[in-house]
Amino acid sequence: MPALQVEGLARHYGEREALAGVSLSLNDGQTLVVFGPNGAGKSTLLRVLATLLRPHAGNVRVLGSRLPEQAWAVRGRIGLLAHEPLLYRELTARENLCYHARLHGVSETRVDELLGAVAMADRACEPLRTLSRGMVQRVAVARAVLHDPELLLLDEPYANLDPAAVDLVEPLIGAGSGRTRVICSHDPSGGLAEADRVLGLRAGQAALARAAADVGPDAIAELYR
């Protein structure tokens, strides 16, 4: 069974259709990169797959569980790195990760391990509001993988990161992590290099859906015209 199986997914906000009849399939261990202009439905798709939004129509299976009926069975197997870091600004980096660790039944040893992995051990006791956006993003990456999820849902995961920080988080969320991944990206060359499959969204509809080997930068650029 595929890790992700989506058929005819629709989701609307009032009268506006954010997703209209989107279908996709992704095997275990593969990476799907989703391209499209702002407002195309990329973040909405991630939120549906993360069980944060209910689909209004269509069939959605994530890691074998049907959504929304079996959302409870899959939430703990998903790691979400959203546009917002999903962290508390008044808490320290370590306090944020310890809070999420308790939610997932993860030890504080894992927290300290990840703070070291993203080079935040020396700043771990400072409130998030005092840290740079790049540092906050590193903590958000640590939060997303804290519970060793099978599926990563990543919205512009390298935003605000300098090259050294990208190298730090790559083992956690990159292709070498071995996890199934869905990545929203505006970077044609970098995104295609990561992808096994490509989904191009425009106005909530799938304008492009095929193997990455069959997609070139020109096809991605066409989505933004």
Image (cartoon, rainbow, N blue to C red):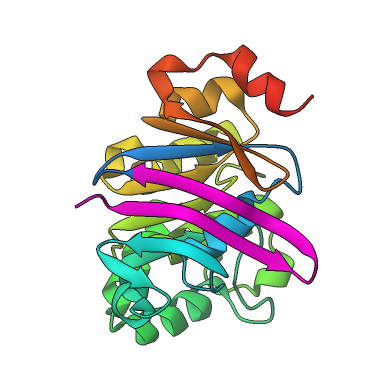
Residue 209 inside the magenta-drawn segment: no
Please provide percent x and percent y for residue 119.
46, 52
- Evaluate whether residue 120 shows in this view: no
In the image, is residue 60 above or below residue 66? above
Please provide percent x and percent y for residue 59.
41, 62
Which one is in front, 200 or 30?
A: 200
Residue found at x 29% / y 48%:
179
Please provide percent x and percent y for residue 50.
47, 66
* Quadrant of res 67: bottom left
In the image, is residue 114 above or below residue 24? below
Residue 21 inside the magenta-drawn segment: yes
Residue found at x 42% / y 44%:
24
Which one is in front, 127 or 151?
A: 151
Q: In the orientation shown, which residue stands out farthest toward the left?
A: 1
Residue found at x 63% / y 52%:
20
Bounds of the magenta segment = 1-25
